Amino acid sequence: MVKCYRKDYPRPQLVRKEWVNLNGQWEFAFDDEKKGCGEKWFEAFPKEPREILVPFTYETEKSGIGDERQHPCVWYHRVLTLDEGVPSGKRLLLHFEGSDFLTRVWVNGQCAGSHRGGYARFSFDVTELVLSGENHITVEVLDSMDVQQPRGKQRWMNENYACWYVQTTGIWKTVWAEIVPEIRLDGMKITPLFDSNELKLELTAAALPECFGTELLAEVSISFEGSPVSFVSGAFLSDRLTLTADMCLSGKDEMNYVWDMKTWSPGEPNLYDIDIRIRYRGEVVDEVGSYCAMREIRIDGTNILLNARPLYQRLILDQGYWKESHLTPPDEEALILDIDRIQALGYNGVRKHQKIEDERFLFWCDVKGLLVWSEAPAAYVYTDSAVREFTAEWMEILSQNYNHPCIITWTPFNESWGISRVETRRDEQHFTEAIYHLTKSMDPYRPVIVNDGWEHTVSDIITLHDYEEEGETFRERYTKCREGILSSEVYHNDFKSALANGYAYKGQPVILSEFGGIAFDNDDEGWGYGNKVNDEKAFEKRFDAIVTAVKEIPYICGYCYTQVTDVQQEINGLMDMERNYKVDPEVIKEINLRHVGYWRESTD
C-alpha cells in the first residue's frame, strides 16, 4: 500500500490532510418546470423538501427516492459549518467528482460557478463566499435526453431498451471540500521515461504572480517501500516547473545494465511513494502525498509490449453498474470487491465500458495490478454541438486520469456511436482523426483506439467485435479470412468492416475486444448475445470453446469478454448484479490462464 492512501479520499494521486467529505443527507427538490432560478431557490430552498443520500442519484434505491422517471432539473441543498471560517493564508475549494450534466453552484446565495459534462471532476474556489458558522451550499443540475451530450449507456427514451439503461441525473460521485494553502501545488503530470529509467514530473503551482521566482521551490522525495530512491528540487520561475528524477534504486553495473528499477505490471504492481513540499522563502507552505509507477506500454509491429515484453491481454468488459446504486459504486469496498473477483476469474485487465469510473477504482487497479482501457461515454448523433461537448470533456478526462499506471489504452469512440456514418463521411472521419491526434498530443505514450469494434480510421490497435457462439466458426473465420477482414473486403461480423473507407491496415496489433456475452438464466426475461444457456455445464462448454478458439488465432494478441456482471435487463455477466458468481470462478480462471500456442511466452 502506498503511504498517501486515505480511505474514501476522492483524489488519490494528490492527497492532503485537511478535507471534508460532503456525502450524506442533502435536501432535494425536483424542478420539472425549471422555476427554481426565477424563484431564487439558491437564496431560500423550497419548504418541506425531500431528502436524498448523496452521491446517489434520485433514480436509484440507494438515494432514498428511487424514481426512474426523467426529471430535467433537480436541486440540492446542505449546510457546511466552518466554526472559524477559512484560516488566514488558506483557501477553501469545493470539489465535485461527477455531476451530470449542467451543474450550477451557489454558496450563501452567491454564484460559485458552473460546469458542463457528466463524467469529469470540477472545482470552485469558494473562499470569498463563505462565512464563520453555517454556510448554505445549493446546487442546480440540468439534464436531458439530448443525444448530443456524452451519455454512455444512459437511455434517452422513457424505458430501457437493448443495452441502454436508466439515466443518471445530477450528483453521482463524491462532493467534498478541501482547505488548501494560498501558495500550493495545483496539479501534477507524471510520466515514466522507461528507456532512460527516469521519471518526469510537470508541476503546476497556484500563487500570486509576484511569488514566482527563486524563492518558490518544489522539493520531491521518491521512495520505494520506505527506501529513498531520488530527491529533486527546483524553483518555480513561472507557474510550471518540470523536474526529472532517476528511478534506479541501486544504479548500474559494469556492463551499464540497469538493475533494480522496480517496474509495474499485473503480476508485480510496484508503486513508488512521492512526497512533495512547496517552500516559499524557506518555509514549507504545502505538503502533498502521491505515488507513481515505472511502466511502458508501446506498439512493436503486430505486438503490444508492456515493459518491453509481449503482453497478451485477457480483458473483461466492465460497465460499472450496481443494482441499488446504478453508476455510483455503493462504497470503496464495492470497487475492491469487483477488482478482486475479476482477477479471481483469471483476467489481467478491464475495458471500462462507456463510463469514467470513480478515481478510487483506478487507484485500486494501480495497487492490485489490473490493466484498464479508459473509454469515453458516447454521444449518439454527429453535430457541431456534439463535437464541442465531447472534445471539451475528453480533454478533462485525459488530464484527470493521465497519472494512473493501470491505464494502458485510451478509447474515445466505440462502434461508431455518435459517428454513425464514419465509414464514408469525411467530416466524421476528420473528427476521429482530430481526437486521435489531440489525445496523442496530451499523451504520446499510450496506444489510442479511435473507434473500438469496427470502421477504424487512424488507430494504434485494430479491434474487432464478434458475438459468434461457436468456437470452431471463430477459429475458421479469423484464420482463413484474416487478409479479407483486415482489408475490409470481408465483413468480420456479417455487417461491419474493420476499417472505414479510405483507410488501410498498416500492420497494427489485432484484439478481439468484444465477444461472448453468454446469457445464463432460466428466466424468459433479459437477454444476452446468441442463445441462452440454462445450466452451468453448458455455459462452461461454450465459454471454453470460444475463448480457446480466440487464443489459438496467432495474430490476435488479446481479447475482451462480455462481461463482468449482469446490468439491468442485460443478463450476460459472469456474475449477477449482487456480485454472485454464476459459474465456478476456478473453471473460468483455468480456461483464461490455459496457455495456447504462441502466447504461452507472453507476460502477465
Image (tube, rainbow, N blue to C red):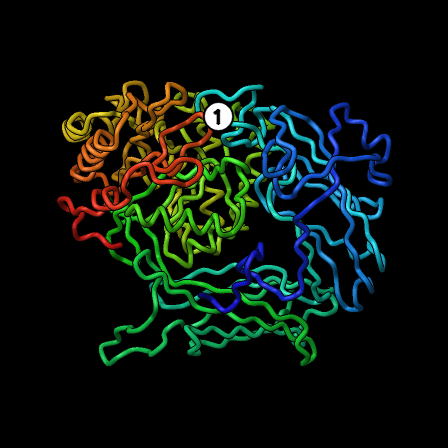
Of residues 236 and 61, the one nearer the viewer is 61
Instruction: Please give left or right for residue 543 compared with residue 160 in the image.
Output: left
Answer yes or no: is residue 122 visible: no
Answer yes or no: is residue 27 visible: yes
Disc 1 marks a residue whose amino acid type is Trp
Q: Position of residue 33 (x, y in %)?
A: 77, 23
Quadrant for the C terminus in the image: bottom left
Residue for badge 1? 164
**Residue at image point 25% right, 31% down:** 539
The quadrant holding residue 549 is top left
Of residues 17 and 402, the one nearer the viewer is 17
Circle 1 residues within 10 Å: few <14, some 14–19, many ≥20: some
Quadrant for the N terminus in the image: bottom left
Instruction: Please give left or right for residue 254 compared with residue 219 in the image.
Output: left
The quadrant holding residue 197 is bottom left
Height in image: 569 above or below 108? above
Identify the element where label 1 is drawn: loop
Instruction: Please give left or right for residue 29 compared with residue 317 in the image.
Output: right
Q: Position of residue 133 (x, y in %)?
A: 84, 58
Height in image: 526 above or below 459? above
Instruction: Please give left or right for residue 335 compared with residue 509 in the image.
Output: right
